[in-house]
Image (cartoon, rainbow, N blue to C red):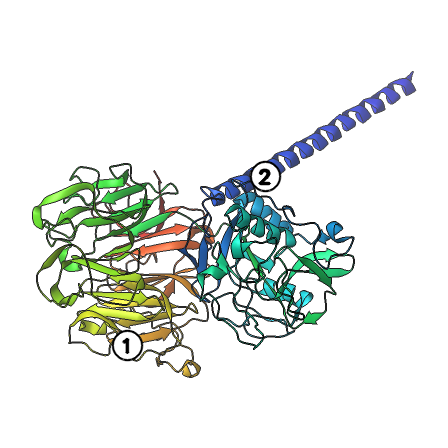
Amino acid sequence: MLNFFKNKRKLKYIIVSVIIIAILLLGSIIFTIVSTQTQENDNAIQIAKATEGYSATNPYVPIGFTHTEGTWDTGFVIKESSTGNEFVWIPVNGTNLSLARRDFPKDFPKSFSTMDQCSDELNDDFNASVGTYKGFYIGRYEAGVGSTSGNNVGVPVCKKGATVWTNISRDNAKASAEKMYQSNKEVFSSLASSYAYDTMLTWFKTQNYSKSIYNVDTDSSSWGNYKNTSNGSIQVAGNNAKWKANNIYDIAGNVWEWTTENCSNDAVVRGGDALSNGSVLPAGTRDHAKANSAFSYTGFRVLLYRDVNAITETKLQVIAGSHQSAYINGNNKLYMCGRNNLGAIGNGSTNDIYSLTAVSGNIAFKEVSLGKSSTLLISNTTYTPGFSLGIATNGDLYSWGGNKYGQLGNNKTSTTATVLTPTKVASSIQKVSAGQNHCIALNSSGKLLTWGSATSGKLGNGSTSGTVTSPTQLNVSTTFKEISAGYSHSIAIDKDGYLWSWGSASSGKLGNNNTSTTVKVPTKVPNMPSNIKFTKISAGYDHNLAIDTNGNIWSWGANTKGQLGRGFKVANLNNLNTRRVTSRAGITITNTTVKVPTQITTGTKFIDISCGYQYSMFIDENGNLYGCGLNDFGQLGTGNNEDQKTVTKITIPNNQPVLKVSATVKHTLIIDAQENIRVFGNNAYGQLGNNYTSPLYSPTVITKP
């Protein structure tokens, strides 16, 4: 009997133990499922946030690239600022296109019996990107000679005028294509797959290129960057519009092109003129050769596609003005806050607004610029240059707020007749910049328009007095791509990347080695090295910042508070045949006027800059934020109000990378990688949007509407 109870007690312990183990296992399984589901949900949220608004008909534009011409249905072209590389969007859905070989002759010349069973080394990242964004980019031109040529593995280029890269094996073409953007944190590059190649050709066919010289099935010999004729002459890339289809040049117009496709143990080359015998082959032609074989007339084309896991780009915008702030959301809706005594907020009232509030009207804005003021006007209770300019997505220009100097461009000037809601004043505008009391714009052709006060020659119309009350085109033959209005001067970048300036030369801010002579018309900054070209500019009160095509910072003008960033380490610039600065990292250099644009480098590339009143903000390629100069209201975000005579890295909570920055008189706005709006600096009129009026000394998140 005793043994029975002992055994029963043992059995009870065993049962309890099994139950406990089962509960623990079940809990572990549930935890794993929940954790996995949570991670999947987080990933889904991140991908959804990254792809919001993007589609086959609304392509994303990677960081460092700009949209230069065309639309989704005519050939959407993007260009990289630093290299000039160009790519064209190929939509995949919405047009019944698919990544598959179809709609091409089955009896390909020089084909063999197993051609239709060829396999393609499709990249998983490419497939995921196409499925997510509904399209991909392909090189506008056949890959050109970059750092090396021939069979060597180097970094090619993809731009007009480059020497086409021939005499390369398929294996080396793959390696070279992948090297183009291996350090980019947002996109991948690779050798074109046959699926992408055929999808591109199908795209041509949907756009009526299956006729005349554009017949991709029969004769595409007239397309190309160049044509190797019997006398060996070469026609330069892009000189004749008929040689391109949907903004893509050189499809089978000159040489064969390698793809990632394989047949048996051979790699596949795609059609074009068979230069060895002079025969003409259609673009859809496929032939084969060993992957490590190099031929004199075989080139390649590069794919560019976004990493679906890289959330490094945002459609959101923040814009800082004298005592106002603006925010444009992913749907192009504009919100503003801050001082509103002149109606600069655009909500129909003149009451100051302490949180981001929708601007009146159902207008989709793609760009906004807010009027600047100097510190001398901050305490002026009767008038400050509170005015706003905005460009709608259709290119219409709107203005609202104060109009003492005609800066609204509505053919009026008045200190009392303010405009309380956005009002259309012009059409076909692509860029706009508001100064203290003058404005600059670029029309759709890249021509300069100015209006407002002409004092100091800052309108560039040859005058130093009076006002211009409507956007008026300047008599300048050059076309421009970037503009920035300062307080008493203006700067611009022309289509070739060179700097121009006009207006007051005080503090050397025109960059022409002068501090006294007013420049009344736009003038190219003299004595700059021809190999230095620029992509971004920002004009401040008495200083300027610029970024060149290599991501280096340049600065010039007043340095009373250390705003020129000359505490950065300066590289030896002898090899660039450019100007040198004799500063070293950590050395305070202030009260020194710099009268010519001077390169400042830190050994890293920069992607964004913004000039405030006697202070500067920078973002490097890794999303690090830096500031220097005046900091009396905490506008540098250092956590205190001490001026920074040398460049200082700004701490962002959780080390969040920063995507965009906008500085102004005394406050700064940024967007971080989680698309938070963070604010810091002066807040006297609620311009920080946090429902208070006290300053903030560190980057602080505010509620988005």
Q: CA distance from mark 2 to mark 1?
A: 53 Å
First along the sequence among labels 2 and 1: 2
Q: Choose between 679 and 67: the one closer to the eye.
A: 67
| Residue 214, horizontal then vertical, whole percent | 53, 55
Q: Choose between 454 and 106: the one closer to the eye.
A: 106
- The tally of labels here is 2
Q: Quadrant of the N terminus?
A: top right
- At 78% from the left and 57% from the top, the residue drawn is 264
* In the rendered image, the vertical position of residue 107 relative to residue 24, given as above or below: below
Instruction: Give the side of residue 275 with respect to residue 314, left or right.
Output: right
| Residue 656, horizontal then vertical, whole percent | 45, 52
At label 2, the amino acid type is Glu
Q: SS of the residue at dot 1?
A: strand
Q: SS of the residue at dot 2?
A: helix
Q: Quadrant of residue 541?
A: bottom left
* In the rendered image, the vertical position of residue 506 relative to residue 40, given as above or below: below
Can the viewer see residue 186 in this picture? no
Instruction: Give the side of residue 480 with respect to residue 388, left or right.
Output: right
| Residue 540, horizontal then vertical, whole percent | 25, 63
Q: Choose between 81 and 314: the one closer to the eye.
A: 81
**Dots 2 and 1: beta carbons under 8 Å?**
no
Q: Quadrant of residue 586?
A: bottom left
- At 68% from the left and 34% from the top, the residue drawn is 28
User: For residue 596, which numbered disc appears in the image?
Assistant: 1
User: For residue 40, which numbered disc appears in the image?
Assistant: 2
Q: Nearer the viewer, mark 2 or mark 1?
A: 1
